[in-house]
Image: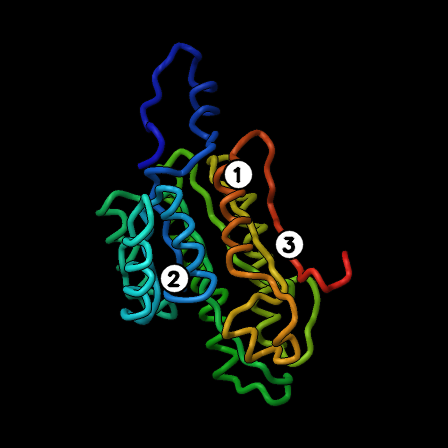
Amino acid sequence: MGLDRNLAGNDGPHAQEQEARMRSEIKGERALVTGAGSGIGRTVSRKLASLGCDVVLVGRTSSSLEGTKALIDDDAVGSGEVRVCDLTREDSIRTLIREVRGEGGLDILVNNAGIMVNAPLEKTRTEDFDAILATNVRAPFLLMRETLPLLRESGAGEVVNVCSAVAYEGYPDQSAYTASKHALLGLSRSFAREVFEDGVRVHVVAPGGVLTDMVATARPDLVGTPMIEPDDIADAIEYLLCHRTNAVCDEIRLHRSTKRPF
């Protein structure tokens, strides 16, 4: 793990606690990234590995995760570990976290996996609504709950929830997705206050239109226009994780350069 859990010195327990909570690099730490097989998740995983993290690559499709691992093995300081997991199943998540604990614990959790349906509310099927909430809200809830003991043990545990611009406003034809991201934002804010005294920090990164297959399907009107790149999200997460000082950034909101400010 990246931090010395038995800090030595004569500055007293409070000074030791403060030192444990500071960070300027994440080399040697262990991170878990969901949705790591493609898009934002793949890019974030590669970024963390390039910074020296050992990254647990989580997703449903083994071949996609192996693709991310191959990219990490080619050019990263850290490593990638493939873990296939159905995030809609609590038993699958529990099994995953037991394995993570047995293999060395956890310092960083990145909840990135998400799905959406592009349809007006009146044409959104109940099963689609349920699936979106299961992946976008219930899975992060379970992962935060189940990893919390490990994040406490870390001494400088961090959670980053990849949210969306729709968490702050309502987008037409995305009612189910918008509801899920509003929920994830609220969940993140409450959880951050609950674990504040434990030294665990919870952050939200909320991008607008990102150049991924999902956005191309949901917003075909944006195709061909300047869009946020997955690398931009990875850079924002790097900032949050590698600048753990007495200043805290709870939320980072990103929008397309062609969209009016604020």
Q: Residue furthest left?
A: 102
> Looking at numbered disc 3 in the image, what kind of residue is underneath it?
Arg
Q: Position of residue 179 (x, y in %)?
A: 60, 70
Which of the image's four quarters has the C terminus?
bottom right
Q: Sequence-wise, which precedes: disc 3 or disc 2? A: 2
Left or right for 187, reference 83:
right
Q: Please tell me whether residue 214 is drawn above or below residue 143 in the rendered image.
A: below
Q: Which residue is mark 1?
A: 196
Question: What is the distance, in whole Å, between disc 1 and disc 2 at their CAs?
Answer: 27 Å
Residue drawn at (29%, 49%) of the image? 79
Q: Which type of secondary structure does the marked residue at label 2 adopt?
A: loop
Q: Give whichever of 91, 18 is nearer the camera.
A: 18
Give the number of the mark in front: 1 or 3: 3
| Residue 42 percent across, percent down from the top left | 41, 61
Query: Which residue is disc 2 drawn over?
Result: 36
**Labelled pair 3, 2 in contact (Cβ < 8 Å):** no
Residue 33 position by quadrant = bottom left
Looking at this view, name the residue that lies furthest to the top: 10
Image quadrant for the N terminus? top left
Label 1, secondary structure: give it. helix
Q: Are marks 1 and 3 in contact (CB under 8 Å)?
A: no
**Mark sitting earlier along the chain (1/2):** 2
Q: Is residue 47 left or right of residue 68?
A: right
**Nearer-N-terminus badge (1/3):** 1
Pointer 3 local density, CA inside 10 Å: few below 14, some 14–19, many at least 20: some
Of the pair 140 and 171, the residue shown nearer to us: 171
Kind of residue at badge 1: Phe
Determine the residue positioned at 77% across, 57% down.
Answer: 261
Please name which of the two marks, 1 or 2, marks the residue nearer to the observer: 2
